[in-house]
Amino acid sequence: MADTADETGVAGAADTDAAAGADTDGKSGGKAGGKTGGRTGAKSDAKAGAKAGAATPRERYRAQVRAEIKEHAWKQIAEAGASALSLNAIAKQMGVSGPALYRYFAGRDELITELIRDAYRSLADAVHAAAVTGADPAGLAHVLRDWALADPHRYFLIYGTPVPGYHAPEEITGISSEIMADLLTACAALEPDAPGTPPGTPFAADLADPRDWADGHPAPPAALHRALTFWTRLHGVLSLELAGHFTGMAFDPALLYEAELDGLRAPRG
């Protein structure tokens, strides 16, 4: 009985809202129809619906509950890490039963996927916004650091230790590829005619092979190498900084990051 009451408490408000919305829409539609005629009124309602969005009151409520669940999930991650994420614990914090939350997320993995998608989407949008203004690789690197410092737990969810037993779907990889594509474009513009990795090395041969990680980007070998170097070295510095490994070492991590950028910006011979 307790579970049923909880589920009604979570989903029942959506039903009430939907009914109220339908009643309001019906009254408004009736008035509009009387003034403008049925056909014209229908067209006006369609245009207004397109502007306001097609979401029904029930759908808006569902989105609101999902957003609240994700807020609680981020708090759990901040306190105990992603591996300790629990929908039942979130349900208890929200004052509902576990089964009630499974109406919004099928399980822990679906919730983690949503959080990872949000994180990647946020970073990809931030990087792309800088890229379209002509930011060079260093500019994109500063965007990455600012984004990571703003929410370290979000950063570690996508670039930290993998969550045991969880495997991200391919669509998530697609979003991460957007970030690399902007970096590759910036690196290609930096030195379009620069030599790449010295020929004859194992890594040069590896870069010459089909590059799934580059998602078919036409960047030359030099840009591929530079982008990978930026990616690995800067994430290394960021991960150490955010994990607190520089604490007590009496230097400014921001200056170390900038020094790494200076080295990465140096022309390749």
Image (spheres, grey):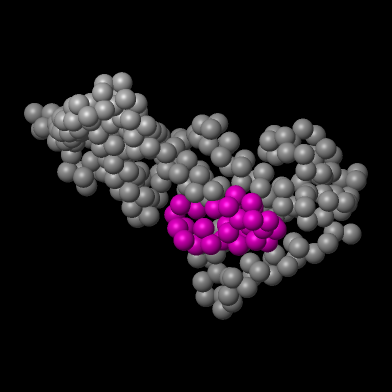
Q: Residue 268 appears in which quarter of the rendering?
A: bottom right
Asked whether residue 233 is in view, the answer is no
Asked whether residue 245 is in view, the answer is yes
Is 148 left, or right, of 229 in this rendering?
A: left
Considering only vertical position in the picture, is 146 above or below 82?
below
In the picture, the quarter occupied by the N terminus is: top left
x, y percent for residue 195: 88, 51
Query: Which stretch did the figure color magenta?
Result: 126-155
* Residue 214, magenta (yes or no): no
Is 175 left, or right, of 134 in this rendering?
A: left
Seen at 72% across and 52% down, the residue is 186
Question: In terms of depth relative to the viewer, which is nearer, 174 or 29?
Answer: 29
In the picture, the quarter occupied by the C terminus is: bottom right
Seen at 23% across and 41% down, the residue is 91
* Residue 128, magenta (yes or no): yes
x, y percent for residue 262: 73, 67
x, y percent for residue 210: 77, 32
- Looking at the image, the residue that sits furthest to the bottom is 250
Seen at 17% across and 43% down, the residue is 95
Considering only vertical position in the picture, is 125 above or below 38?
below
x, y percent for residue 16: 15, 33
